[in-house]
Amino acid sequence: MSSKEIRESGMVFAFPEDDLFWIEQCPTVRAIGEGVKVVEMIVRQNNVLVFIEAKQSSPRPDNQQPFDIFIEEIYEKFRNSLLLFAAISLNREFKKTSHLPANITPGIIASAPIRFYLIVKGHRDEWIPPLDEALQLSLGGVQKCFGIASVKVINDVTAKKYKLIV
């Protein structure tokens, strides 16, 4: 099985093509155009659907306005990605159709646990809790309504341990 390598936010992601839905580059997102922000990718890893958003940095929580704007943007990306993935899985009609990879079948959205990961490159462990708390708070309703297993902010060191980056 061939592997696809994606470079994003100073990190390298590599997954088997049959397990990777590069939603950010899918035909449906490109056809929708401006105004619909999505995460980088959705990956099937150990029978879990992992939604991944990668960033090189994040604002500090004490810089309230940029921090709030950042959290709102990340919330929007995860929410839109989940909705769009569900719509594609249900074969909703779009100007351009996107096809899911072989190992991400439409039925998986009903059965597989879903995890949201925001990966911030170079983020120190002590910087993660306020960002993680704010993201979990903003996505709380989505998490409850859709049964999302977890919403986490991690750094590149943890992402390597989770085998999300190489």
Image (cartoon, rainbow, N blue to C red):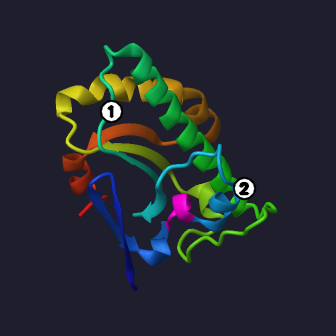
The front one of 4 and 115 is 4
Q: Does 97 sit left or right of 15 as displayed?
A: right
- Residue at (64%, 58%) from the top-left corner? 29
Dot 1: within a 10 Å radius of its alpha carbon, few (fewer than 14), some, or many (20 or more) residues? some
The front one of 3 and 64 is 64
Residue 141 position, x and y percent, is 60, 28
Q: Relative to 1, does residue 141 appear above or below in the rendering?
A: above
- Residue at (46%, 55%) from the top-left corner? 40
| Residue 122 among those drawn in magenta | no
* Residue bearing the label numbered 1: 58
Residue 66: quarter of image: top left
Dot 2: within a 10 Å radius of its alpha carbon, few (fewer than 14), some, or many (20 or more) residues? some
Query: Label 1 to label 2, Cα distance in Å?
Result: 30 Å
Overall secondary structure of the magenta stretch?
Answer: helix
* Residue bearing the label numbered 2: 87
Q: Earlier in the sequence, mark 1 or mark 2?
A: 1
User: What range is drawn magenta here?
Assistant: 21-25
Q: Quadrant of the C terminus?
A: bottom left
Q: How many marks on residues?
A: 2
For label 1, the SS is: loop
